[in-house]
Image (cartoon, rainbow, N blue to C red):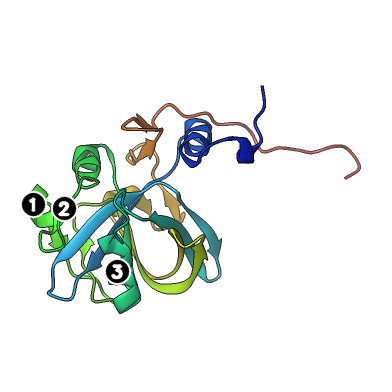
Amino acid sequence: MEYAPNDLTSRERYKVLTGFVVPRPIAWVTTIGPAGVVNAAPYSFFNAFCEDPPLCMFAVNLRPDGRVKDTLVNIQRTGEFVVNIADEPLARAMHDSSGDFPPEIGEPGYLGLRLAPSTKVAVPRLADAPWAMECKTWKTIDVNGNRQLILGEGLNFHIRDELWDRDAMRVRMDRYHPVGRMFADRYCRTDDRIEFPPAEGAPGA
């Protein structure tokens, strides 16, 4: 079967995209409000796109009632945020942080998540996250007035010691258990992995 996007409602297009473009990595983004309240919210329209400079991008839409999300308000004010990655022990808290919280209540405090200071931005990171990247806003792209694509430049990386082989500069995948987003309230583990030998290409290439 096939669909033309213009023949679908916005909600239907969302279902077609998020139902098949899976699993998606999740940016658990921390920001800080004007009163010092730390916000943490997950975004699965997210990925890393470049290493020089290190760039990531995630999309922030409006709330169902049309209000701007705290993440976007805070980033527009400060130009700073931290992308944290959730692994299996943090998955439920990450999911719960997607609920509706008023600006004066920080998700980390409410959910009992530990914070740690960042090195190059004022926004704290989630202390127990296996990986975090401190970011400054590199560029924002407005999409139809109801969604912002936020590109962040990584300024500093934080990695849980046991997950990184410093000599090989490689992640120890047997110890790293990130979760991925499927659709709706469904997530996936990432431990069932496939490894192939290097691709050789065609003779004479």
Q: Nearer the viewer, residue 193 or 110?
A: 110
Q: Amino acid at mark 1?
A: Tyr
**Is 187 positioned to the left or the right of 150 in the image?**
left
User: Helix, strand, or loop for circle 1?
Assistant: helix
Q: Which residue bears the numbered disc 2? A: 101
Is residue 98 shown to the viewer in this render? yes
**Displayed quadrant of residue 76:** bottom left
Image quarter where the C terminus lies is top right
Q: Which residue bears the numbered disc 3? A: 73
Cα gap from disc 2 to disc 1, whole angstroms: 9 Å
User: Helix, strand, or loop for circle 3?
Assistant: helix
Image quarter where the N terminus lies is top right
- Label annotation for residue 42: none
- Label annotation for residue 110: 1
Q: Position of residue 141 (x, y in %)?
A: 51, 67
Residue at image position (24%, 44%) is 94
Which label's residue is closer to the chain start, 2 or 1?
2
**Displayed quadrant of residue 175:** top left
